[in-house]
Image (spheres, grey):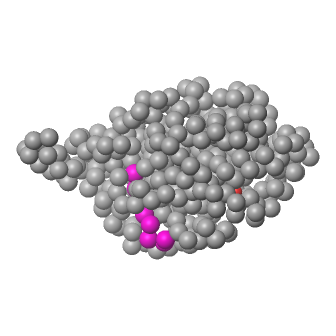
Amino acid sequence: MSDLQSLTSSITAVTSPFRSYLTDLHTQYQANNDGAVADYIPELALAKPEWFGICVVTEAGQVFEIGDCDQVFTIQSISKAFVYGLALEDHGREYVNSRVSVEPSGEAFNAIVLDETTNRPYNPMVNAGAIATSDLIKGANGTERLKRLLAMFQRYTGRELDINVPVFLSEKATGFRNRAMAYLMLNFGMVSDRIDETLDLYFQQCSVMVTAKDLAMLSATLANGGVNPVTQERALDERYVQDVISVMLTCGMYDGSGEWAYRVGMPAKSGVGGGITAVVPGKLGVGTFSPLLDAKGNSVRGIKVCEDLSQDFGLHLFNVAKPKLDLADCLTGNDVDNW
Ligand code: GLN
C-alpha cells in the first residue's frame, strides 16, 4: 500500500459515520454498570463487568468492531437458535415441530414446564426445548454429534471454534434442573433415551467459546439468507432461515421477548455469558458482549445498544417511519475491517 493509500484508508476508518456512531454508543453505555455477572458456576463469575464489545456485520460483508470484540466467552443459550436450525436440516420442519413447539412460554428459561396438552416443550429457545432440540442432532455417538455441531457453528463464524472444557464440566456437574427436564421429557417420549449423551451435547453447545464478532457473523449469516457474507459459505439451508429467525423474534430473549419485540423488533438471542446476537433480515447482524445481566438473564448494555440501533436507524421489523439516520448513508465510508 502506498503512503497516500494508507493515509486515505486510515482517514476513512476514523471518519466513517457508522463507526463513529457505534463508538459513541460504546462510550455512552460503558458507563452503565447495572446488572450482575452470572455466577451459577464459578467460571462465569470470573467475567469482568467492564468487558464490552459491539460488532456489526453487514450483508455486504463489512465488519465494524468496537471495544472488546476479541474477548472470548461462552455462547450459552445463543447456541439454541443455531442448533434448532441444524435439527431442522436433520429432520425437516414437521418432525421437529412434533417434538418442540414454537410458542413463547412466558416463563423463565430454566422453568420445568411442558405444554399440558401435547407434552412438548414450549419452544427451542428455553432450556427444555433446547435439550429436546439437541436430542434431534444426528450422529452415531456423542463425539460425532459434537463434531457436526461445531462444524455447523464454524460455517456461520468462518473460523474454528472450541469448547471451554471447565465451563462444560461445571455445567454438567451442576445442571440438575436440566437433567430433570430431560427425564420429564423422556417420560413423555419427547426425547430418546440417550439422555446422558444428549445432556453432554447440550452442555457442550452452551460452552462453545465465541467473541462479539462471532455473534455478529452468526446473525449476519441469517440476515443474508443463511450464507456467511464474508466467506460466502452456506451455513443453513435457505428453507429454514425464516423458521430460525421467527422463533428468535418470539422467544429469543426469554420472558423478556415480548418487550424486546415491542421496543427493538430485531429477532435476537441472548445468553448468560453476556452475548446477544440480533438479526436485521436482508441488512445486517449485530453481536454484543457485556456480561452484566438483568434479572431475566439478558445483557443490560447489549439491550441498550440494540434499542438505540433499532430506533436511530429504523431497524424495527415493523418500522414504517422515516428513520432519524439513514443506514445506507452511514455505511458508505468503505470502513471494512479485514476479517
Ligand atoms: N447453560 C445454561 C443453562 O442451561 C444456559 C442458560 C442461558 O444462557 N440462559 O442453564
* Residue toward you, 54 or 294: 54
Q: Quadrant of ligand 1?
A: bottom right
Relative to 144, does residue 65 appear above or below in the rendering?
Answer: below
Residue drawn at the location 28% of the way across and 43% of the way down? 336
Q: Per the image, is 178 magenta?
A: no
Residue, x 79% and y 33% (percent of image)? 98
Tell which residue pokes out farthest to the right in this image: 187
Q: Give the magenta range.
A: 48-55
203 or 108, which is in the foreground? 203
State the image coordinates of residue 140 (x, y, percent, origin top left). Answer: 76, 33
Residue 304's place in the image compared with 248, above or below, is below
Of all residues, the one furthest to the left in this rendering is: 4
Quadrant location of the C terminus? Answer: top left
The image shows residue 257 at horizontal and vertical percentages of 61, 53
What residue is shown at x 78% (from left), y 56% (from top)? Answer: 178
> Does residue 334 appear in this view?
yes
Q: Position of residue 260 (x, y in %)?
A: 55, 54
Is 326 on the left or on the right of 148, as rendered? left
The answer to whether residue 261 is visible is no
Which image quarter holds the N terminus?
top left
Q: Residue at x 45, y 53 (%)?
A: 212
From the image, give the main secondary structure of the stretch colored magenta.
loop
Q: Is residue 20 left or right of residue 235?
A: left
Work out whether 166 lies above or below 103.
Answer: below
